Each structure stands twice: as structure tokens, then as C-alpha cells.
Image (tube, rainbow, N blue to C red):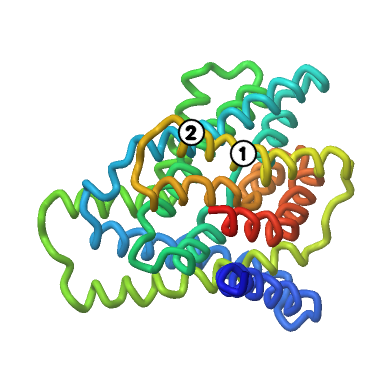
Amino acid sequence: MFAIANIVLPVFALIVAGYILRRRNILSLNASTELNRYVVWLALPALMIDVMVNSSWSELYQPEFFYAFELGVFIIFFAVLVLHWLKTKNLVSAAIDATSASYANTGYIGLPLCALTFGADKLGPAMVAAILTVSANFAVSIIFIEAGSQTGKSLFVTFRNVGISLCKNPLIVAPVLAGLFCATGLQLPYGVAQSIKLLGASASPCALVATGLFLAQRQESASPAVAIWLVVLKLVAQPLIAWYFAFCVFDMPPLWAHSAVILSALPTGTGPFMLAELYGRGGGIASRTIFLSTVLGIVTLSVCLTLL
């Protein structure tokens, strides 16, 4: 039990630190935005590049992990999407709710949690999950939101807008460039490699503090019942689905199987709130889901790590 506490508590201690600093107004309202930009544009891309250039393709190519993790995401996503759309007839709000119930915080919490659990040299699964989350999962959410909000626009225009958005995302560009560089067989110059490593080392603590700063912001009013229902799906149903596929259906290395479950059990990331703010829909439910899932995630992640 103490071993589990040593893994979970440091992660959430930094989140609490960011929360307290914002609540006491030691860090301003803009601190969350600026620190988030630093993490997204510098620290996390550097960490991804560092992991990729120091890993072999055979280590990262685990299609069974892809299936187990993504099936957990999309079963929850489409179930919520259909049910909420049938109830509200509003595809935009339904897509945001579905994203809130399935979008794991792989970058800000998943990477540091896996580093503490498995070691900093075994971040392959977390990195792959982070790329899938910010690319494939985010893209699917945007497609449904665009389809519901841009009436009159062709499917081609919708896909073009999504493609442009993804190509500008540094969390996608960084691993793609790292992959292309690895394919050449060249080695990064020592100075460049050390700079990237230093930047990457700051990703985890900064991301966790940024999460606390975000949670300390005033939450919009929303139906608690809906948010609680989405949190239960995110923290309980999604990891159970991933566990079934990772351990009962597919055959993959233990590190990847355990990572699939842990990464699926993560709290909701900030992606749904960003989409809600961008499109002006469902921000209250999204922010409440992020807040509740992060707080309750301390318990559910501890249980998950204990059972695994």
C-alpha cells in the first residue's frame, strides 16, 4: 500500500500545489494559460522526441496495445454520443459529453504516473497513448462537433479543417519529426540531445502544476448527475473494457498490458473543456467532469495499481 501511495501521491501533490497557488492568488489567472502553452509547445514535444530517439521501432510497435486502449476509448465515446444525441438532439453537446467520458489525461498525468510506476525509461506505452489521444481521439471529437455546428459545409471542408488543425499541433508534429529522424539512422548531436532531455524533464512537473491551476478556476454550473455519470464511465467502465481486451483477448508484453489499463483509468483531460470553450457548448459539464474525475482519480488509480 505504501508503494502505491509513493506512486500516486507525488502526482496529485503537484496538482494540489498548483491548485493552492492559484486559489491564494500567488499565481495569476494567466499562469494556467502560459504554463499550459509552455508544456504543449516545448516540454511535452521534447519529452516525446527524447523517448522516440532512444527507443527502437520494435519496442513502440504494439498493435494489440492500440486496439485495447482505443477500443476502451471509442466504446465509451460512441455509447455516450448516441445516448446523449437521442436525448438532446444536439450533436455538438453530445460529442463534448462523449469526449468528457472518454478523453484520458495521458499527457499531463499519464506520462508522470507511468514514469513513477514503471521507470522513466519505459514510457513507450504512455507516449503512444498520448499521441493517439491528441491526434485520433481529438480528431474524431472535432469531426462530430464540426458536423453538428457547421451546417451547410461539405464533408470535405470539415475534414480539411480537422487536418489543418492536427498538422499545427506540436504534440503530433514532434513525434512525426522524431520518427522521420530515427528512420535516417542518424544520432542527435550531444548538445541538442541534452537540451531536449532538459526540456523533457520539465514536462511532468509543469503539466501537473498546470492541471492544478486549471482546476482552481471557477467551474461553470452544470448538472451534477450528468457529470457524475460521465466520471463513472471514465474511471470505472473504460479501464474495465481496456483490461478485458488487454488481458483476455490480446497477447502483449506485461508492460504494455498494464499500461493500457492504467492509462485508460486516468482522469479526463482538458481537451473536452477546450472544445467546449471553442464552440461555446457544454463547458459546465466538461469542466465539472474534469474536476471530479481528477479528485476521484486518486482513489480509482490507487485501486487499479493495487489490483495490477
- For label 2, count other residues whose C-alpha is less than 10 Å away and answer few (under 14), some (14-19) or many (20+): many
Q: Using the rendered view, name the quadrant where residue 206 is placed.
A: bottom right
Residue 178 in percent (x, y) is at 26, 54
Q: Residue at x 43, y 45 (%)?
A: 257
Residue 232 or residue 161, whichever sits in front: 232
Regarding mark 1 in the picture, which secondary structure is present there?
helix
Residue kind at label 1, given as amino acid type: Gln
On residue 290, the disc is none
Marks 1 and 2 sit apart, C-alpha to C-alpha, by 11 Å
- Horizontally, residue 228 falls left or right of residue 61, namely right
Q: Are marks 1 and 2 in contact (CB under 8 Å)?
A: no
- Horizontally, residue 229 falls left or right of residue 11, namely right
Could you tell me which quadrant the N terminus lies in?
Answer: bottom right
Q: Residue at x 67, y 30 (%)?
A: 95
Residue under circle 2? 245
Q: Residue at x 74, y 60 (%)?
A: 295
Disc with the residue nearer the chain's start (1 vs 2): 1
Residue 115 in percent (x, y) is at 44, 66
Q: Give the number of callouts.
A: 2
Residue under circle 1? 238
Residue 236 in percent (x, y) is at 68, 43
Can residue 52 be seen by looking at this rendering? yes
Q: Residue at x 38, y 59 (%)?
A: 123
Residue 223 in percent (x, y) is at 89, 41
Q: Using the rendered view, name the quadrant where residue 33 is placed.
A: bottom right
Residue 135 or residue 114, whichever sits in front: 114
Disc nearest the viewer among 1 and 2: 2
Residue kind at label 2, given as amino acid type: Phe
